[in-house]
Image (tube, helix red, strand yellow):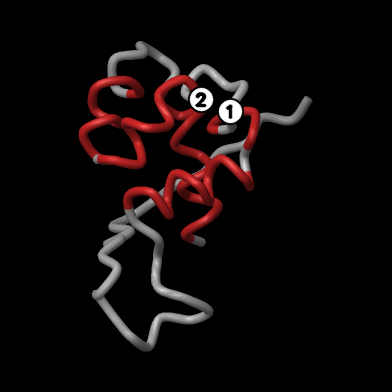
Amino acid sequence: MAKRIAFLFGAGASKGASILTKPEPPPVMKDLYDKLAEQFPDEWGPTSRLGSHADAFRRDFEKAFTDFVLQMPNNVSFWDQPFSIDFA
């Protein structure tokens, strides 16, 4: 299997950052988690390692990311790649 590499530079995922963002402004909190879970079920979906923390991500995505994802050594890129792909 080919190794995938993705880079994410300054996503600036502020919902109100620009009304001109096309096709839509980046999602935040609940909407961000739900979009990631739908598009990347292996990493973010209900049966993934993070699926049991869905409510925490919907309440406060940044806190949940810090509490659950950043505490997993050497695995951050597994969950970070979907951000890069989605925001690209």
Q: Amino acid at mark 1?
A: Pro
Quarter where residue 71 is shown: top left
Q: Position of residue 23 (x, y in %)?
A: 53, 79
Q: Quadrant of the N terminus?
A: top right
Residue 13 vertical position relative to residue 4 in the rendered view, above or below: below
Label 1 or label 2, whichever comes before in sequence order: 1
To which residue does mark 1 refer? Answer: 46
Q: Is residue 78 above or below residue 40?
A: above
Query: In the rendered view, does 23 fall on the left or right side of 18?
Result: right
Residue drawn at x 32%, y 31% is 56
What SS does tag 2 mark? Answer: helix
In the rendered structure, the answer to whether residue 31 lies left or right of residue 88 reads: left
In the rendered image, the residue lying farthest to the top is: 73
Image position, residue 18 (x, y; %): 29, 81
Q: Is residue 5 left or right of residue 74?
A: right
Is label 1 in contact with label 2 (beta carbons under 8 Å)?
yes
Where does the image place residue 42, in percent across and percent down from the top left?
64, 28
Q: Which label belongs to residue 51?
A: 2
Badge 1 crowding class, 10 Å Cα cut-off, few under 14, some 14 to 19, many 20 or more, is: some
Instruction: Tell which of 76 and 30 is nearer to you.
Output: 30
Where is residue 31 drawn, in percent x and y?
A: 43, 54
Image: 2 above or below 30: above
